[in-house]
Amino acid sequence: MTNRRYLISGLAGLALAAITGSAMAQDTVKVGLILPMTGPFASIGKQVDMGARLFLAQNGSSFGGKKIELILKDDTGSADVTRRIAQELVVNDKVAVLAGFGLTPLALAAAQVSTQAKVPQIVMAAATATITEASPFIVRSSFTLPQASEPMADWALKNNIKRVFTVVTDYGPGIDAETSFANKFKAGGGVVESVRVPLRNPDFAPFLQRAADAKPDALFVFVPAGIGAQFMKQYVERGLDKAGTKLIGPGDVVDDDLLEGIGDVAIGAITTQHYSAAHESAANKAFVTAFKAAYPGTRPNFMAVGGYDGMRLIAEALKKTNGTIEGEALVTAMKGMNFESPRGPILIDPETRDIVQNIYIRRTERKNGEIYNIEFDTIPMVKDPVKAAKK
Ligand code: DHB
């Protein structure tokens, strides 16, 4: 070969490398997963991340000809950090999708970024009703507090509970839980007294003392996932476990991740929620078995299912668009999507982009030596009542 031919074949080689390189770059779709992995809400981040990764591990990570590359970032639970990370992921890493969002303020902090960049924002954990209205690019795989709390009011009214004291964390989801429960319960003739506890460094003792003094029939509680053990410790210290006051509420206070640590004091609690690790279905048994095998010593809670199903929404959307990563096309693909989740059937409401799902009434019990929330009744395919009422 002449030098010239060497040169040509060298250039061809470079060109080939460039083509392969760009084809490879095109074949990868980056998903930015923003979660609180450290700080007081780390249990939420860890569960969502484990769920999301389990879905990819089980299904291969290629969908519609695109390989999903997850980029996990820790926002430490601070909204300013979430916003900055969301911007960096969009501008520098060119992610096609933003996902995660462990708390309401964190989901809201990224909404402007997703709207401006036209990047889908999959909310896998945060649960204030209005979140989906903050950006047309938000799709939710978790739940809403009114969706879980209104059925609790119906159950309480039917079960001879007349006076309820509510204790909720003082921010979006807590206020949603309190208002949706209280409105429904009062409309049915019930009486409610309410207190709200700060989100940061909560000391439940003075609020629980007021609850103990009020001697209600039931104590309705919302605290974010991961905080229930702290709450229950102070609940016992105030003697509320012995006072005959029933513990009720959305399921966050008895989340599966904490139940063994909380122990017998949780037994008898009645909660309403969309997921229990004890949910009786083949899909859930397979999910729980795979989760425990992948992450020994842990049990999936509702946050893990939000991560698992959120990743499935992204995967199914990529399949539907044949790998097109344009934001509006992906969101359109997710609208109306439905499948069987480990929690039961789910649907993405095409009008609101929020999740429609069963809400189960559960009693916390010991089963085969372990403590679980055992479902005993189902309210099928509940829409977020706050958005449904606006129509
Ligand atoms: C949030 C909601 C929850 O139900 C929960 O367990 C934790 C956080 C939230 O929206 O901030």
Image: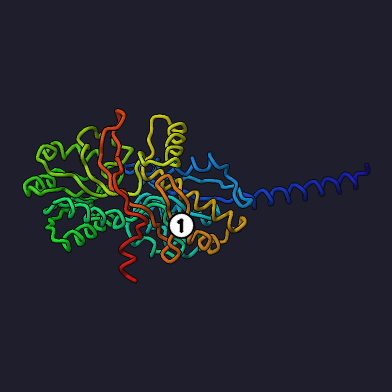
Secondary structure of residue under mark 1: strand
| Residue 98 locus on image (x, y percent) | 48, 54
Please name whichever residue, 334 or 66, is drawn nearer the observer in this view of the structure: 334
Describe residue 297's horizontal placement relative to residue 175 as left or right.
Answer: right
Q: Residue at x 13, y 36 (%)?
A: 237
Describe residue 229's horizontal placement relative to residue 112 as left or right.
Answer: left
Please name whichever residue, 222 or 197, is drawn nearer the observer in this view of the structure: 222
Is residue 42 shown to the viewer in this render? no
**Image quarter of residue 38:** top left
| Residue 19 locus on image (x, y percent) | 73, 51
Q: Amino acid at mark 1?
A: Gln
Q: Mark 1 highlights which residue?
A: 121
Q: Residue at x 69, y 51 (%)?
A: 23
Assign the C terminus to one quadrant of the image. bottom left
| Residue 87 locus on image (x, y percent) | 47, 56
In this view, the residue farthest toward the right is 2
In this view, the residue farthest toward the top is 369
Q: Residue at x 12, y 44 (%)?
A: 245
Assign the N terminus to one quadrant of the image. top right
Is residue 206 shown to the viewer in this render? yes
**Image quarter of residue 253:** top left
Describe residue 171's horizontal placement relative to residue 206 as left or right.
Answer: right
> Does residue 246 lie above or below 96 as drawn?
above
Q: What kind of colouring is applied to the model shown? A: rainbow
Badge 1 crowding class, 10 Å Cα cut-off, few under 14, some 14 to 19, many 20 or more, is: many
| Residue 108 locus on image (x, y percent) | 37, 59
> Does residue 173 lie above or below 389 as drawn?
above
Please name whichever residue, 190 or 335, is drawn nearer the observer in this view of the structure: 190
